[in-house]
Image (cartoon, rainbow, N blue to C red):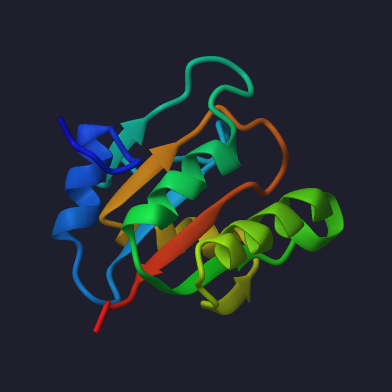
Amino acid sequence: MKKGRLLNSELSYEIAKIGHTAHITVCDAGLPIPKDVKRIDLAIEAGTPNFIQVLKPILSEMQVEEIILAREIHDHNIPMYAAIMKAFKEAGMDPKIIEVSHEEFKKITHESEAIVRTGECSPYSNIILKSGVTF
């Protein structure tokens, strides 16, 4: 049995095979997911699992050098922005932060290796994690 924190085999596999600068998106329950991108759907019901419950184990396995957020998070979900920043601090990472419009964010998701859907039902709870290197 895997000893690390992240037990989901599909998600663990996607992180293991990702290369430098490739990215994975973690999203709320409402973000449209492009048909041509691998979907890892963890949503069980509204709020379960929540966004941060999914993000933290990912950060325990993935080195992230850059994140992309929709700038609308500042107007509509300050608590989530704060929770995201806290999760990165706890993981010992200080990634570059890129902010784009929500419409641009949705376009960028088409380039993701995978999109992980959570049960989060709060606005703009979405992040693109660009892979870094551990050396």
Residue at screen point 17% across, 46% down: 13
Left or right of 98? Residue 25 is: left
Q: Nearer the viewer, residue 126 or 8?
A: 8
Reply above or below: 50 against 110.
Answer: above
Quadrant of res 28: top right
Quadrant of res 110: bottom left
Residue at screen point 24% across, 54% down: 15
Residue at screen point 17% across, 55% down: 16
Image coordinates for residue 68, horizontal then vertical, percent: 53, 68
- Residue most toward the top? 45
Q: Nearer the viewer, residue 24 or 86?
A: 86
Left or right of 3? Residue 51 is: right
Q: On the rendered image, what quadrant is the N terminus found in?
A: top left
Image coordinates for residue 36, horizontal then vertical, percent: 24, 45
Reply above or below: 106 against 47.
Answer: below
Q: On the rendered image, what quadrant is the C terminus found in?
A: bottom left
Residue at screen point 60% across, 67% down: 89
- Residue most toward the front? 3
